Image: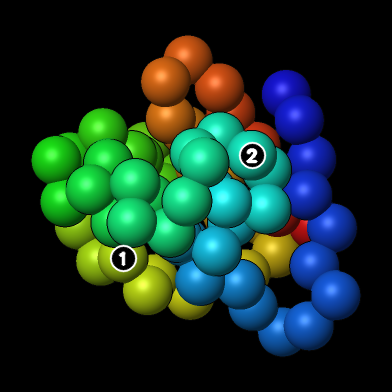
Protein backbone atom coordinates (compact mmCIF):
# COMPACT_ATOMS: atom_id res chain seq x y z
CA UNK A 1 0.00 0.00 0.00
CA UNK A 2 1.23 3.45 -0.91
CA UNK A 3 1.46 6.17 1.76
CA UNK A 4 0.90 9.91 1.50
CA UNK A 5 2.32 12.23 4.14
CA UNK A 6 0.19 15.21 5.08
CA UNK A 7 1.89 18.58 5.29
CA UNK A 8 -1.18 20.18 6.93
CA UNK A 9 -4.15 19.04 9.02
CA UNK A 10 -6.02 17.56 6.04
CA UNK A 11 -6.17 17.28 2.25
CA UNK A 12 -9.31 17.36 0.12
CA UNK A 13 -10.10 14.17 -1.79
CA UNK A 14 -9.88 15.67 -5.28
CA UNK A 15 -6.57 17.33 -4.41
CA UNK A 16 -5.18 13.99 -3.22
CA UNK A 17 -6.18 12.26 -6.46
CA UNK A 18 -4.32 14.95 -8.41
CA UNK A 19 -1.29 14.98 -6.08
CA UNK A 20 -0.87 11.22 -6.53
CA UNK A 21 -1.27 11.66 -10.32
CA UNK A 22 -4.07 9.09 -10.24
CA UNK A 23 -6.02 11.55 -12.43
CA UNK A 24 -4.69 14.15 -14.88
CA UNK A 25 -6.82 17.09 -13.71
CA UNK A 26 -9.19 18.42 -11.09
CA UNK A 27 -12.09 18.07 -13.52
CA UNK A 28 -11.41 14.37 -13.96
CA UNK A 29 -10.99 13.99 -10.19
CA UNK A 30 -14.47 15.47 -9.67
CA UNK A 31 -15.94 13.12 -12.28
CA UNK A 32 -14.46 9.93 -10.82
CA UNK A 33 -15.76 10.86 -7.35
CA UNK A 34 -19.22 11.76 -8.74
CA UNK A 35 -19.30 8.46 -10.65
CA UNK A 36 -18.74 6.47 -7.45
CA UNK A 37 -15.31 5.17 -8.35
CA UNK A 38 -13.52 6.22 -5.14
CA UNK A 39 -13.76 4.72 -1.67
CA UNK A 40 -12.55 6.16 1.61
CA UNK A 41 -12.06 3.70 4.47
CA UNK A 42 -13.90 1.02 2.50
CA UNK A 43 -17.03 3.09 1.78
CA UNK A 44 -18.05 4.85 -1.44
CA UNK A 45 -17.34 8.56 -1.18
CA UNK A 46 -19.36 11.12 -3.13
CA UNK A 47 -18.04 14.28 -1.45
CA UNK A 48 -15.41 15.76 -3.76
CA UNK A 49 -14.02 18.00 -1.03
CA UNK A 50 -14.01 15.32 1.67
CA UNK A 51 -11.31 16.28 4.17
CA UNK A 52 -8.89 13.39 4.52
CA UNK A 53 -6.87 13.09 7.71
CA UNK A 54 -4.17 10.80 9.05
CA UNK A 55 -5.25 7.16 9.03
CA UNK A 56 -7.73 7.46 6.14
CA UNK A 57 -7.37 4.92 3.33
CA UNK A 58 -8.39 5.88 -0.21
CA UNK A 59 -8.91 3.43 -3.07
CA UNK A 60 -9.32 4.17 -6.77
CA UNK A 61 -8.77 2.13 -9.92
CA UNK A 62 -6.96 -0.72 -8.14
CA UNK A 63 -4.68 1.67 -6.25
CA UNK A 64 -4.69 2.25 -2.50
CA UNK A 65 -3.10 4.92 -0.29
CA UNK A 66 -3.00 5.51 3.45
CA UNK A 67 -2.78 9.08 4.73
CA UNK A 68 -0.07 9.61 7.34
Q: Secondary structure at mark 1?
A: loop
Crowdedness of circle 2 by 10 Å Cα count: few (<14), some, many (20+)? few
In this view, the residue in front, 34 or 42, is 34
Across and down, in percent, residue 29 comes to 38, 50
Q: How many marks?
A: 2
Which label sits on residue 48?
1
Q: How is the image coloured?
A: rainbow
Mark toward the viewer: 2 or 1: 2
Whether residue 50 sits left or right of residue 32 in the image: it is: right
On the question of residue 8 being in view, the answer is yes
In this view, the residue in front, 65 or 34, is 34
Could you tell me which residue is drawn at 34 percent across and 46 percent down?
A: 28
Could you tell me which quadrant the N terminus lies in?
top right
Could you tell me which residue is drawn at 49 percent across and 39 percent down?
A: 23
On the question of residue 33 being in view, the answer is no
Could you tell me which residue is drawn at 53 percent across and 48 percent down?
A: 17
Per the image, the residue denoted by label 2 is 21
Could you tell me which quadrant the C terminus lies in?
bottom right
Across and down, in percent, residue 18 comes to 57, 51
Across and down, in percent, residue 42 comes to 37, 37
Cβ–Cβ below 8 Å for labels 2 and 1? no
Q: Earlier in the sequence, mark 2 or mark 1?
A: 2
Vertical position of residue 37 compared to residue 9: above or below: above
Across and down, in percent, residue 32 comes to 27, 41
Crowdedness of circle 1 by 10 Å Cα count: few (<14), some, many (20+)? some
Amino acid sequence: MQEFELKSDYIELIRLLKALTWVPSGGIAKLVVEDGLVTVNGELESRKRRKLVKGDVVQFDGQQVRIR
